[in-house]
Image: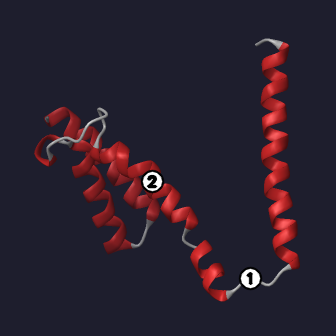
Amino acid sequence: MRPYQVAVILLMGIVTYATRVGFIGVARQFELHPLLRRALEYVPVSILAALIFPAVLAPAGRLESPAGNEYLWAALATSAVLVTTKRPWLAIVLGVTSLVGLRRLM
């Protein structure tokens, strides 16, 4: 790796860290409105959904038929296991296993 690439990566890390620490430091000085605080609790879930849904619904870059989309069926199986058992590790293991099995079948 070239020295300027290492420098860019380090600077990006510093900027990312500084913005997060800065926001946390400023946010602690102010009392957030309860509605805003409650809304901010959903940010991680919405970011995760924004990352997962396009990959599940359109794995090839375009919307696919649900019948032939093994990612969708594996996601549904994973969600069902998570909702019924409330054990994320079990849902992840069974989700990956179901995806591997569906890929071999389809």
Q: Residue at the left extreme?
A: 67
Mark sitting on residue 32: 1
- Report the residue marked by disc 2: 50
**Element at label 2:** helix
Question: Is label 2 in contact with label 1 (beta carbons under 8 Å)?
Answer: no
Residue 45 picture location, percent across and down: 50, 64
Indicate left or right for 64 with 97 as reference.
left
**Element at label 1:** loop
Q: Is residue 81 above or below residue 65?
A: below
| Front one among 102 and 30 | 30
The quadrant of the rendering that contains the N terminus is top right
Q: Residues within 10 Å of mark 2 (few under 14, many from 20)?
A: few
Q: Residues within 10 Å of mark 1 (few under 14, many from 20)?
A: few
Could you tell me the amino acid type at mark 2? Ala
| Front one among 86 and 6 | 6
Q: Is residue 5 above or below residue 70?
A: above
Mark 2 or mark 1, earlier in chain: 1
Could you tell me the amino acid type at mark 1? Leu
The colour scheme used here is secondary structure
Indicate left or right for 23 with 84 as reference.
right
Residue located 49% across and 62% down the image: 46
Residue 19 picture location, percent across and down: 81, 53
Residue located 84% across and 58% down the image: 21
Quarter residue 92 falls in: bottom left
